[in-house]
Image (cartoon, grey):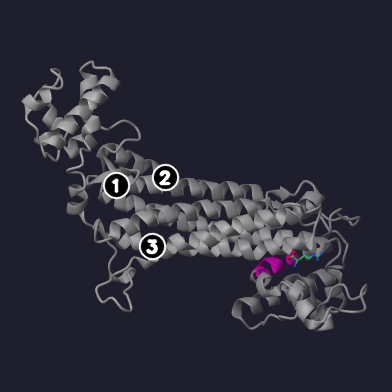
């Protein structure tokens, strides 16, 4: 540990030993926010100069040195000092080393408490935007595939039992709708996040005449945070983003569970292709959906990170406590994981080859048309509960006779259950007819699914959606 990196040397003469120092240091992970720290420092230094809190010469020297640090970070020419306490100490240390008194002037009216809250918000804004872009891409992939398969019949399931005929396009729009809400959740969180903590100091603001409005604007925030104590103690933005990540990842996990089922030999609905499968080290015949499984598996850590963050926050007395340093690794991991998983998911969904014949065959033989028989009777005036019983008796009859669908029964057989049934019923209970008749808003009829696709495309194109 080099002394130049300790910002509190004036108060404590003794230092923790190397192992203890490294236990409490955060540069190992907060170096990710280096460019944000530089950006925030430039805004702060420029404002200090304009307000006459530091000299114009110092302000100019700081700006040039910070620009140089940013260049060094971007090109990789500047290496991190892993013995610095955190990224804030590292950057301030570089300034002091390079500029002497100008470097020693920059921390006026600032604390690492408002600095870290600002850097973290700036970082989250960037990462959140990347996730929103990845969500949009995944939504567009699903909608493109849905359009392609708006007419591809397949069984819809409840209780993992075949339930009613739908289309693949309809099922893919269901997924896209969930991801579209996720995109909205990230947007909402980023809107609420967009207030600037700088100028809050340690917890009680400062006696120096800072211009918080100018700094907030300079950094692209909507406004300075309202209350300094809240601004340094608050991590709601991290919780909200961690929750948005957990919900998104949970969605991906459910989709991937379906994909794993669909890719099985038993279902045979989808071929993920060799590029999106892996083999077995022992069983030569295997082609496993490892990518989908791993997306499902990664959900554990993302959901765990949310609980970890909530647990860090509960019981924290106001305002700043070092516990808050634990906010970053958990959220970084969630943001990284969701971004990577969205990209992988969009990749294999774009490449998947669906087996239309197998999907269509899944509509046959399970009496998936039974509800349509009941609704046929309702349209003829029968109360629904009576119609439900009547259709159930027809199904039982068919099963007793070894038939696989109501369509295989004779007209006379079904008429025994209700005289309201006429020959036109058979054309109305094919899987395609069942789907096409469900053309209300929200239904699986192909034209209605195309309308849903257009609506979600509109959402995906809206910048702030
Ligand atoms: N590394 C710290 C964090 O991530 C920065 C703030 C430190 N403030 C303090 N008073 N120790 O939270």
Highlighted magenta segment, given as a residue range? 33-42
Question: Left of 376 or right of it: where is 453?
Answer: right
Magenta segment, principal secondary structure?
helix
* Pointer 3 residue: 292
Q: Is residue 147 left or right of residue 197?
A: left
Q: Position of residue 258 (x, y in %)?
A: 35, 54
Find the distance from the CA under tag 1 to the CA under tag 3: 20 Å
Q: Is residue 423 above or below residue 280?
A: above
Q: Nearer the viewer, mark 2 or mark 3?
A: 3
Which badge, 2 or 3, comes first in the chain's sequence? 2
Cα distance in 3D space between marks 2 and 3: 20 Å
Name the spot of residue 413 as percent of width and height, x first: 9, 27
Contact? badges 1 and 2 (CB < 8 Å): no
Q: Nearer the viewer, residue 453 or 54?
A: 453
Q: Nearer the viewer, residue 76 or 241?
A: 241
Q: Say which residue appears at 72% left-offset and 48% top-offset.
A: 223
Image quarter where ligand 1 lies: bottom right
Q: CA distance from mark 1 to mark 2?
A: 12 Å
Question: What residue sits right under mark 1 in the picture?
Answer: 169
Q: Characterize the local packing of mark 1: few (<14), some (14-19) or many (20 or more) Cα atoms within 10 angstroms.
A: many
* Secondary structure at numbered mark 3: helix
Residue at 93% in and 78% down: 13
Horizontal side of 249 relative to 452 (left or right) equals right
In the rendered structure, find residue 177 and report the number of the disc placed on it. 2
Q: Nearer the viewer, mark 1 or mark 3?
A: 3
Q: Does 394 appear above or below 307?
A: above
In magenta segment, residue 41: yes
Residue 126: horizontal and vertical position, in percent? 59, 60
Residue 94 in sight: no
Residue 282, image quadrant: bottom left
Asked if labels 3 and 1 touch by Cβ distance under 8 angstroms, the answer is no
């Amino acid at each position: 540990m080099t002394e130049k990196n300790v910002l509190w040397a004036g108060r404590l003469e003794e230092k923790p030993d190397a192992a203890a120092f490294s236990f409490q240091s955060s540069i190992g992970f907060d170096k990710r926010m280096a460019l944000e720290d530089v950006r925030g420092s430039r805004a702060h230094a420029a404002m200090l100069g304009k307000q006459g809190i530091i000299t114009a010469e110092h302000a100019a020297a700081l700006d040039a040195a910070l620009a140089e640090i940013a260049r060094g970070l971007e090109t990789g020419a500047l290496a991190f000092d892993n013995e610095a306490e955190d990224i804030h100490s590292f950057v301030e240390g570089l300034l002091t080393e390079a500029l002497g008194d100008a470097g020693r002037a920059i921390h006026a009216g600032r604390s690492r408490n408002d600095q870290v809250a600002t850097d973290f918000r700036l970082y989250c804004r960037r990462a959140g935007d990347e996730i929103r872009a990845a969500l949009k891409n995944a939504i567009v992939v699903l909608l493109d595939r849905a359009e392609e398969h708006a007419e591809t019949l397949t069984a819809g399931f409840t209780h993992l039992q075949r339930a009613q005929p739908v289309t693949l396009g309809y099922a893919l729009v269901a997924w896209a709708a969930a991801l579209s809400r996720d995109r909205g959740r990230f947007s909402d969180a980023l809107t609420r996040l967009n207030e600037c903590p700088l100028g809050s100091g340690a917890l009680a603001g400062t006696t120096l005449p800072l211009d918080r409005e100018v700094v907030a604007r300079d950094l692209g925030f909507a406004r300075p945070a309202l209350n300094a104590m809240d601004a340094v103690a608050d991590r709601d933005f991290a919780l909200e983003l961690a929750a948005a990540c957990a919900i998104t990842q949970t969605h991906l996990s459910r989709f991937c569970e379906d994909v794993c089922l669909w890719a099985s030999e038993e279902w045979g609905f989808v071929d993920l292709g060799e590029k999106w499968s892996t083999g077995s080290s022992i069983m030569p015949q295997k082609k496993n959906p490892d990518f989908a499984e791993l997306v499902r598996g990664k959900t554990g850590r993302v959901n765990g990170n949310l609980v970890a963050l909530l647990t860090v926050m509960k019981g924290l007395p106001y305002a700043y406590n070092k516990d808050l340093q634990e906010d970053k690794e958990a959220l970084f991991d969630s943001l990284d994981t969701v971004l990577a998983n969205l990209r992988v998911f969009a990749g294999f969904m774009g490449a998947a080859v669906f087996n239309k014949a197998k999907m269509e065959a899944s509509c046959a033989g399970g009496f998936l048309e039974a509800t349509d028989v009941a609704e046929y009777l309702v349209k003829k005036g029968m109360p629904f509960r009576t119609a439900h019983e009547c259709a159930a008796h027809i199904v039982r009859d068919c099963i007793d006779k070894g038939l696989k669908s109501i369509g295989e029964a004779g007209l006379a057989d079904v008429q025994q259950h209700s005289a309201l049934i006429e020959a036109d019923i058979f054309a109305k209970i094919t899987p395609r007819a069942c789907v096409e008749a469900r053309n209300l808003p929200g239904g699986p009829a192909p034209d209605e699914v195309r309308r849903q696709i257009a609506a979600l495309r509109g959402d995906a194109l809206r910048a702030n959606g």
